[in-house]
Amino acid sequence: MPESARITSVEALESFRSSLIIYLEKAIRAAADINHEVVSTHLWLQSDRRVHWEAQVRRLTTELNLRQQELFSARIGNLQNNTLMEQKAVQKAALALDAATAKLALVKQYCRQYENRVAPMAKEIEKVRGFLANDMRQAVAVLTQIIHTLNAYAEIKGGGTAPAPAPGGQP
């Protein structure tokens, strides 16, 4: 077994450490952004979209009732069958109400399924973020300690070639 280690490049470790720190910061930020998007989307579905389509259904129901009353009035006032415009208005209002009701049903379905579909994946992202924030930061600390140890070892084996202090005691 050899008595001394052959250190060829501590700079390579320092470069790797620097790159790892940059990567960790970007990865942690990306995981936090994903978590934020998951929460924001869930809130958007539950509050904004659901409230919007419920209001649309109420408004379009009122609109349909109004158009049906206009058609009924036109039929009573006009004993002739000249109520084509009113019939088209009723059909248009009914189609709009059907579309809004379908979209509300989809939003409700998405809200129910969101927890089952998205929550497990969000949990995995949170685990990755925890790994990056805790374990990998500890790995950077260990790598830093290794670099310091190797520099000290190289200094000892090199015959104490540490830089001499500058005149006046300033390094």
Image: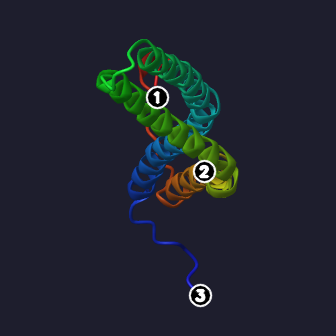
Which is closer to the viewer, label 2 or label 3? 2
Q: Amino acid at mark 3?
A: Met
- Asked whether 139 or 57 is in front, the reply is 57
Location of the N terminus by quadrant is bottom right
Q: Answer few, some or many: residues within 10 Å of disc 2's Cα (few below 14, many 20 plus, some between 14 and 19).
A: some
Q: CA distance from mark 2 to mark 3?
A: 37 Å
In the rendered image, residue 75, in percent from the top left (x then y), is placed at: 43, 20
N-terminal of the two: label 2 or label 1?
Answer: 2
Count of all numbered marks drawn on residues in the image:
3
In depth, the one of 163 and 125 nearer the eye is 125
Residue at image position (43%, 32%) is 96
Tag 3 secondary structure: loop
Residue 132's label in the rendered image is 2
The residue pinned by badge 3 equals 1
Report the front residue among 165 and 41: 41
Q: Residue at x 54, y 21 (%)?
A: 65
The colour scheme of the drawn protein is rainbow
Q: Say which residue appears at 56% left-offset and 19% top-offset.
A: 62
Mark 1 highlights which residue? 165
Toward the bottom, the furthest residue is 1
Decide which of 135, 57 is in the foreground and name it: 57
Q: Amino acid at mark 2?
A: Leu
Could you tell me if the residues under marks 3 and 1 are in contact, i.e. CB atoms within 8 Å? no
Quick one: SS at disc 1? loop
Farthest residue to the top: give it: 77
